[in-house]
Image: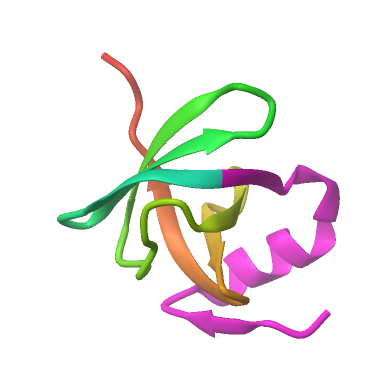
Amino acid sequence: MSERTVAVLPIQRAVATASPSAWSDAMVMCAGDGSVTLAHLDGRVSELLTGAPATVGSPVAFHPVAEVLSVDGAWFSARAVLAA
């Protein structure tokens, strides 16, 4: 697997690489101000805090265990916002 990592810690890279089945495909619903909202293909919606340059309508993948968002083949740290 060839990917670019941007602001991803070595442990995040190791976890994401070691558990490829945890990736979830999604489309960006909303993006801006350091966060993105994703519509996952399984129907879930999640909000992430990230500096990833995602645009509305873009296909992405999120690894919730490693907290990594893949956008156009580049990996970015992305923390899920927990609902109150």
Is the N terminus in the top left, top right, bottom left or bottom right quadrant? bottom right
Nearest the camera: 24 or 63? Answer: 24
| 65 displayed left or right of 57 | right
For the record, the magenta segment spans 1-26
Q: Position of residue 14 (x, y in %)?
A: 71, 69
Q: Within the magenta stretch, is there residue 33?
A: no
Residue at the front extreme of this rendering: 57
Q: Is 20 situated left or right of 24 in this image? A: right
Which of the 4 quarters of the picture holds residue 72? bottom right
* Quarter that holds the C terminus: top left
Q: Is residue 8 left or right of residue 80?
A: right
In the rendered view, would you say 39 is above or below 50? Answer: above
**Figure label count:** 0
Indicate how the structure is coloured in the image.
rainbow
Closer to the camera in the image, 72 or 82: 72
Residue reaching furthest top? Answer: 84
Would residue 7 be counted in the magenta stretch?
A: yes
Residue 27 pos. (x, y %): 53, 46
Question: Which quadrant of the view contains residue 16?
Answer: bottom right
Where residue 19 appears, as percent x and y from the top left, is 82, 53
Q: What residue is rendered at 55% in x and 81% in y? A: 5
- Residue at x 40% of width, y 48% of height: 79
Check the image and name the residue furthest to the left: 33
Residue lying at 61% horizontally and 22% vertically, measured from the top left: 43
Relative image position of residue 81 (x, y in whole percent): 33, 34
Residue under the image location 32 percent in, 18 percent down: 83
